[in-house]
Image (spheres, rainbow, N blue to C red):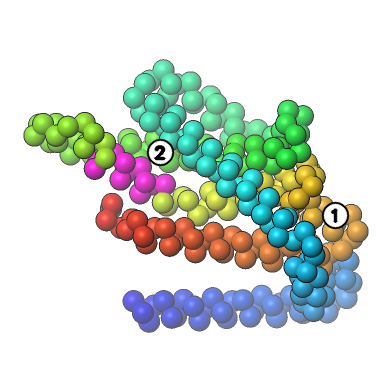
């Protein structure tokens, strides 16, 4: 196992080196900072960006919007998923809603959010809308995938309902959610940033990306992309840490 992990790390480092080499080659061939900046100018812009007085506020507000939107999505998905597993009426009501959310273009959702909400709330709404269907279906499937024979056996031995929910249904729900947490957090963050790029709140990564684009500062855009990738990586580490602390494997 240790050798496997070390091999994966080596491959990851090699792949990153290859990406940087290709980046350096392309920037030299194109030879135009506006179209494709060099590694040197990008990292210079990265340092300048980090040194900006409002850098931490920019990161903070984007993360707050992302996390709040995600938690609202998760809470509503848990509620509606559980109710849909109990009530056929609610299940049938949710079917067209999910189809609508899955079919409507992302840009249309962002535009509607800008019409309905303030510049500060619109990005949060966009993130919420994009991850809610995924989380809802994950919760619902977690309940429906429970082995009915286990439930019947628990009822046969007169196990109380609270214990059945706590020891059978909840582990199945949380196990399913643990499989999509990283991806949905990433999607949510990306959609919040996309919403910020159009909504232009005072502080936000998307607002800064749009500003760099206005000034044709492509190296600045690349710098913010690197920052976003680092944030996504941090999310990944945090989720894996939570999984480890909660001992998710025991639910399998």
Q: Which residue is mark 1?
A: 211
Residue found at x 66% / y 60% = 228
**Count of all numbered marks drawn on residues in the image:** 2
Residue 49, label in figure: none
Residue found at x 80% / y 65% = 52
Residue found at x 69% / y 66% = 226
Q: Position of residue 231 (x, y in %)?
A: 61, 61
Whether residue 181 is visible to the viewer of this picture, yes or no, is yes
Question: Is 148 positioned to the left or the right of 190 in the image?
Answer: left
Q: Earlier in the sequence, mark 1 or mark 2?
A: 2
Label 2 neighbour load within 10 Å: few <14, some 14-19, many 20+: many
SS majority, magenta: helix
| Occupied quadrant, residue 149 | top left
Mark toward the viewer: 1 or 2: 1
| Occupied quadrant, residue 138 | top left
| Occupied quadrant, residue 46 | bottom right
Residue 139, label in figure: 2
Q: Which residues are magenta?
A: 167-177
In the structure shown, which secondary structural element does the residue marked by tag 1 occupy? helix
């Amino acid at each position: 196992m240790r050798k496997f992990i070390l091999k994966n790390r080596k491959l990851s480092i090699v792949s990153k080196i290859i990406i940087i080499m290709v980046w350096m080659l392309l920037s030299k061939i194109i030879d135009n900072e506006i179209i494709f900046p060099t590694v040197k100018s990008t990292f210079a812009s990265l340092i300048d960006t980090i040194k900006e007085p409002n850098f931490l506020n920019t990161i903070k507000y984007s993360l707050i919007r992302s996390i709040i939107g995600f938690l609202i999505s998760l809470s509503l998905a848990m509620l509606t998923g559980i109710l849909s597993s109990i009530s056929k009426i609610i299940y049938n009501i949710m079917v067209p809603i999910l189809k609508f959310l899955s079919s409507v273009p992302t840009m249309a959702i962002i535009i509607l959010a800008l019409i309905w909400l303030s510049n500060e709330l619109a990005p949060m709404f966009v993130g919420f809308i994009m991850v809610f269907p995924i989380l809802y279906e994950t919760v619902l499937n977690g309940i429906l995938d429970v082995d009915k024979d286990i439930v019947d056996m628990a009822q046969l031995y007169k196990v109380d309902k609270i214990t059945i929910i706590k020891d059978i249904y909840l582990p199945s729900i949380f196990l399913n959610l643990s499989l999509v947490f990283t991806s949905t957090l990433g999607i949510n963050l990306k959609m919040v940033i996309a919403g910020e790029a159009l909504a232009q709140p005072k502080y936000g990564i998307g607002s800064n990306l749009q500003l760099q684009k206005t000034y044709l500062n492509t190296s600045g855009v690349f710098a913010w992309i690197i920052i976003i990738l680092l944030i996504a990586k941090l999310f990944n580490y945090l989720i894996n840490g939570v999984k480890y602390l909660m001992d998710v494997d025991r639910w399998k």
